[in-house]
Image (spheres, grey):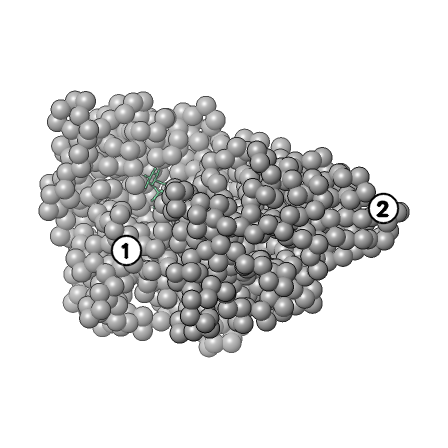
């Protein structure tokens, strides 16, 4: 069952009924000002940091699930009938409804009783504000006397404090209303540096800024008193809950349309601003007034919106594919790339499942996100890498997260996830291959942001590798510390006394438990380091990295192989995890993926054997499960993984992030059919027809799909902010389609499904444009042997670097 359809030409997903199984959301903003918007206009906005600069208030885990947002109300002043054109919050019957989620904009259109309202929400490039453009049309054959009310609820900036510190918050809210603009100036009294504003292009019939006046006592957003009576109260908030609401009256002749523009924005005064007379609490509006006036003009809005579209043309234009599979094309060309940009901007901070409070930018996550967006915005990838590296400690260790506004490591969560440092190597390697910009390696970067501690980025990478080498456990495998990629595999948790709270053993090396996953990741990272060292002419060092990779490969084969698959880890007591020796958690997906990616077992058949075990034991029609059998009860020595009921999250859920590792591994062993089959099983566009089961948005990946042990097998959760986006993008574009950026050029080495006749692609790379055609004989399952580059034969599969601006034609044929 579907709740909408894809409009690939307009790059939109069109939702045609408001009651989707879950709110289906989109993101506004591309640079510094961001918003989340659902298909019924729910959501909130923030400037840079969803925790520290939250503009509008949103209550998570609400009932209904999604209430609070960018709401308009229309009132027929002749009858008193009123409704929300976005359905929520009044949920009145609508004669028509359509929500189009596009690239950084959302358009919600609906009609009731002959009044059509179409609202476009977007953030113009280069601005710290959002536009709501409401087009109200009278489709009746009589005149309509209407009222239009806007509404938002201001958050008192720090969203964590806003949600908890009511004894203070109920007395701090302050607003100012001047020339029809509502200013939210809580905190201005003390800091004088930031405020929000909410403006409207029409003359106001009234306004409200006090929530309880606008709504009325004991009423919610579905039934505001001001809307019901058809007149605002002109309330001025003092403490309690400041809101912004404009009241506009519209007289529309039959067939007449009117555009009303609302602008919600964030402003910062210059550091040295001394605008106010001392002691005055009046906002200085000189810098924002011209901005507001500019954006309230419909022509400016139209141009700003067109510019946003052009921005996306450029971003997405760098890689376009035409394959025999429309679901692949749609995801690669539009939605997967878009999701990669959103995860770049948000990391794991703000979605409808990540509160924007709990988690900042993840060290591990942000490095992996690079894989998905580096080709679109290499300059920002560079900046991101340097920000991340600056949070690294001198030991090579990494804070697990950092706050985007301060760019400082988060002390509350701290460090000790022992995979973290190695992701920096893999992120930088991806950047280097895409851009060829080796200068980044010489950039001075501090440790833990401490002034004076700067060392070249290359030194940070060295320390990342050394961090693992300095922390090896009893079998010579890397110590896992608090956890590795699997946050919930907490193997240093134990209690000697049953019934007592568990402790985390923190000795100098972070416990004794070891990770085969980190071992695989180390092999991969050490090989990347060897290549980077060679790039710098450090051949001896490169050789050391290669031999370290080889040695670790040996350790994996000796202690990490369980007979038919790679083991997952050893617990604190030295017992194998992910082994046939246990009756639960016998096989985990992560080491099968990561070890094969690193090349372990490729020559001796272990890789193929491990992948066969994955197919036999972990693959389901809804994707590949993280581990089997699920843990039936809590096991203190495994930690959080066993806290989930079977089938959810890390306890045998389909953790989508890991599936592309297996797709890549299958491609590496030359199995195109299976790689692509796995790709399709979790491809959201393919799953669109199962929307009543999948429940999350059909245009983006979710973190998890319930595994076969769950009663809701196939149900997705936690959409949008997941490493799944970047890794699937890498799996399909770099491994199945085989277009891999490398130091020497663009590799074209696809591993395709047998029944494909080939595909075409356009790939921007190092300033040149590669027009690629791959043809394949029917049923052939082999690999490309040589390329024809601009008419000349090139042995192997690397199309050499070309002059910037050049167009390079690459042809490849798979014959056997
Ligand atoms: C959280 C878990 C969660 C995991 C993955 C951890 O940091 O504690 O609840 O499952 O991250 O999202
Ligand atoms: O690897 C983690 C990621 O950093 C956050 N989400 C869950 C993953 C698996 O635990």
Point out residue 486 in the picture as x, y percentages from the top left corner.
30, 41
Q: Name the secondary structure under disc 1.
A: loop
Q: Where does the image place residue 416, in percent across and percent down from the top left?
A: 21, 47
| Mark seen at residue 137 | none
Q: Is 84 or 28 nearer to us in this picture? A: 84
| Vertical order, 502 against 602 (above or below) | above
Give the quarter the ligand 1 occupies. top left
Q: Is residue 641 above or below residue 398?
A: above
Residue closest to the eye, 632 or 797? 632
Q: Is mark 2 on a helix, strand or loop?
A: loop
Residue neighbourhood size for the residue with mark 1, other residues' Cα within 10 Å, grouped as few (<14), some (14–19), many (≥20): many
In screen coordinates, is 423 left or right of 767?
left
Q: Nearer the viewer, residue 603 or 509?
A: 509
Q: Going from the N terminus, do you reach mark 1 or mark 2 first?
A: 2
Marks counted in the figure total 2
Q: In which quarter of the image is residue 20?
A: top right
The residue that mark 1 highlights is 409
Which of 727 and 129 lies nearest the eye of the viewer?
A: 129
Residue drawn at 37 percent across, 66 percent down: 383
The residue that disc 2 covers is 140
């Amino acid at each position: 069952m579907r709740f909408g359809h894809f409009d690939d030409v307009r790059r939109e997903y069109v939702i045609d009924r408001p009651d989707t199984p879950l709110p289906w959301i989109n993101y506004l903003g591309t640079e510094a000002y961001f918003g989340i918007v659902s298909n019924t206009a729910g959501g909130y906005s923030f400037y840079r940091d969803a925790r520290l600069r939250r503009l509008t208030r949103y209550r998570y885990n609400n009932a209904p699930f999604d209430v609070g947002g960018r709401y308009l109300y229309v009132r027929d002043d002749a009858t008193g009938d009123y409704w929300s054109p976005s359905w929520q919050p009044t949920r009145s019957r609508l004669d028509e409804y359509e929500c189009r989620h596009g690239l950084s904009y959302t358009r919600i259109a609906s009609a009731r009783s002959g009044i059509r309202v179409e609202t476009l929400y977007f953030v113009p490039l280069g601005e710290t504000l959002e536009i709501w453009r409401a087009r109200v049309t009278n489709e009746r054959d009589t005149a309509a006397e209407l009222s239009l009310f806007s509404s938002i609820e201001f958050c008192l900036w720090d969203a964590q404090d806003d949600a908890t510190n009511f004894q203070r918050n109920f007395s701090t809210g302050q607003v100012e209303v001047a020339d029809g603009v509502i200013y939210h100036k809580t905190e201005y009294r003390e800091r004088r540096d930031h405020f929000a504003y909410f403006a409207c292009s029409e003359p106001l019939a009234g306004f409200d800024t006090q929530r309880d006046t606008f709504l009325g006592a004991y009423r919610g957003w579905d039934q505001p008193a001001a809307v019901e009576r058809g007149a605002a109260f002109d309330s001025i908030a003092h403490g309690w809950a400041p809101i912004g609401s404009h009241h506009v009256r519209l007289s529309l002749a039959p067939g007449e349309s009117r555009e009303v523009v609302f602008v919600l924005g964030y402003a910062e005064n210059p550091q040295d601003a001394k605008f106010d007379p001392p002691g005055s609490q009046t906002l200085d509006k000189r810098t924002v007034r011209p901005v507001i006036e500019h954006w309230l003009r419909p022509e400016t809005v139209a141009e700003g919106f067109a510019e946003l579209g052009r921005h996306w043309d450029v971003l997405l234009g760098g890689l376009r594919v035409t394959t025999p599979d429309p679901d692949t094309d749609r995801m690669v060309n539009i939605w997967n790339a878009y999701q990669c940009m959103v995860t770049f901007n948000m990391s794991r901070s703000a979605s409808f499942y990540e509160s924007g409070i709990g988690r900042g930018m993840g060290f591990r996550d942000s490095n992996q996100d690079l894989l998905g967006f580096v080709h679109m915005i290499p300059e920002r990838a560079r900046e991101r890498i340097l920000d991340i590296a600056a949070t690294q400690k001198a030991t090579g260790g990494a804070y697990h997260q950092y706050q985007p506004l301060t760019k400082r490591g988060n002390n509350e969560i701290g460090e000790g996830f022992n995979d973290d440092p190695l992701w920096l190597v893999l992120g930088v390697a991806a950047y280097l291959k895409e851009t060829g910009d080796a200068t980044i390696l010489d950039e001075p970067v501090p440790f833990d942001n401490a002034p004076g501690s700067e060392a070249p980025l290359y030194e940070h990478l060295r320390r990342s590798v050394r961090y693992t080498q300095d922390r090896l456990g009893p079998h010579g495998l890397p110590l896992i510390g608090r956890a590795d990629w699997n946050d919930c595999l907490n193997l240093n948790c134990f209690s000697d006394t049953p019934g007592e709270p568990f402790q985390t053993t923190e000795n100098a090396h972070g416990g004794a438990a070891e990770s085969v996953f980190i071992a695989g990741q180390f092999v991969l990272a050490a090989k990347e380091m060897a290549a980077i060292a060679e790039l710098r002419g450090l051949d001896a060092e490169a050789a050391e990295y290669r031999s370290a990779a080889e040695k670790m490969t040996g350790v994996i084969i000796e202690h990490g192989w369980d007979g038919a698959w790679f083991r997952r880890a050893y617990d604190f007591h030295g017992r194998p995890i992910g082994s046939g020796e246990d009756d639960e958690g016998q096989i985990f997906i992560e080491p099968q993926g990561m070890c094969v990616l690193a090349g372990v077992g490729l020559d001796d058949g272990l890789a193929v054997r491990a992948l066969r075990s994955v197919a036999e034991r972990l693959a389901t029609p809804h994707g590949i499960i993280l581990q089997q059998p699920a843990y039936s009860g809590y096991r203190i020595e495994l930690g959080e993984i066993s806290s989930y009921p079977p089938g959810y999250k890390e306890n045998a859920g389909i953790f989508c992030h890991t599936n592309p590792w297996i797709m890549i591994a299958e491609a590496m062993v030359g199995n195109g059919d299976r790689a692509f089959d796995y790709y399709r099983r979790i491809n959201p566009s393919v799953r669109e027809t199962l929307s009543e089961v999948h429940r999350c948005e059909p245009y983006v990946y979710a973190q998890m799909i319930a595994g076969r042990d769950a009663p809701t097998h196939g149900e997705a959760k936690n959409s949008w902010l997941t490493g799944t986006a970047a890794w699937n993008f890498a799996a399909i574009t770099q491994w199945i389609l085989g277009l891999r950026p490398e130091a020497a050029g663009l590799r074209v080495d696809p591993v395709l499904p047998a029944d494909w006749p080939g595909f075409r692609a356009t790939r921007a790379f190092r300033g040149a444009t590669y027009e690629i055609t791959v043809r394949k004989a029917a049923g052939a399952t082999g690999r490309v042997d040589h390329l024809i580059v601009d008419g000349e034969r090139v042995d192997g599969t690397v199309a050499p670097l070309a002059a910037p601006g050049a167009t390079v034609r690459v042809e490849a044929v798979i014959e056997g």
